[in-house]
Image (tube, grey):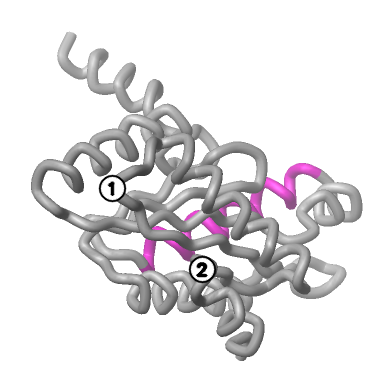
Amino acid sequence: ITQKIKELEKMALLDPLTELANRRYIELNIQTKLDEMRRYGKPFGILFVDIDHFKNINDFYGHEIGDKVLTMVANTFMKNVRASDIVGRWGGEEFIAIIPNINEAQLYFTANKLRVLVEQSGFSLNSGIVQVTVSIGATLALLKDTAETLLERADKLLYYSKANGRNRVSIDQSMIQDSLHAKN
């Protein structure tokens, strides 16, 4: 019975394709991190990640290759975050990472490192190499935040990245100007 319970828990909290945390698990953890931040002063940030032009991958190569791209991106994240970081699939081609005990500069560095690593990864097909890029919105949680306001801000920053050329990281307003010039 305990094995069955463990399997059910895993199914309830994991995305079956990527084996990352699922949206429900991410939502629960954001709330926990907000509570910890208010109670103990533990800072954390959120990365909202979207695979650029993912629809084109599915349309051109098919959904099987699309799934392979999602798995590749998920694995790139999992192999390159700290044990305390939580990475999940938000839905479709969107991912969220919860990065605890971090400041704004470290959050930007982490986001940009992941962006570059995704850009450098790929896999071979008969027709060539499949590679993708990601756009990222990064933000630190504020004491006044709710899970909704935090995710909304990260989402706005993600769309800022997309609107400004994709394959980039946009972080809170104070650094948006910098992110325009830091795409290297």
Q: Is residue 78 magenta?
A: yes
Quickly name the residue at label 2. 171
Is residue 128 shown left or right of residue 83?
right
Image quadrant in which you'd find residue 179: bottom right
Residue shown at 43% from the left, 74% from the top = 108
Which residue, given by chain and number where applicable, does mark 1 sit on?
Answer: 143
Query: Quick check: 47 above or below 12?
Result: below
Amino acid on which disc 1 is placed:
Leu
At 50% from the left and 74% from the top, the residue drawn is 174
Position of residue 24 relative to residue 168, above or below, is: above
Q: In which image quadrant can residue 83 be found?
A: bottom left
Percent across and percent down for residue 119 are 63, 76
For the residue labelled by badge 2, is the local secondary structure a helix, a strand or a loop?
strand
Secondary element type, mark 1: loop
Rendered location of residue 121, percent (x, y): 59, 74
Q: Does the magenta stretch include residue 13?
A: no
Task: Indicate the quadrant where residue 35 lies.
Answer: top left
Q: Where is 39 relative to 183, above or below? A: above
- First in sequence, mark 1 or 2: give its number: 1
Magenta range is 63-80
Which residue ends up furthest to the right in the rendered image?
60
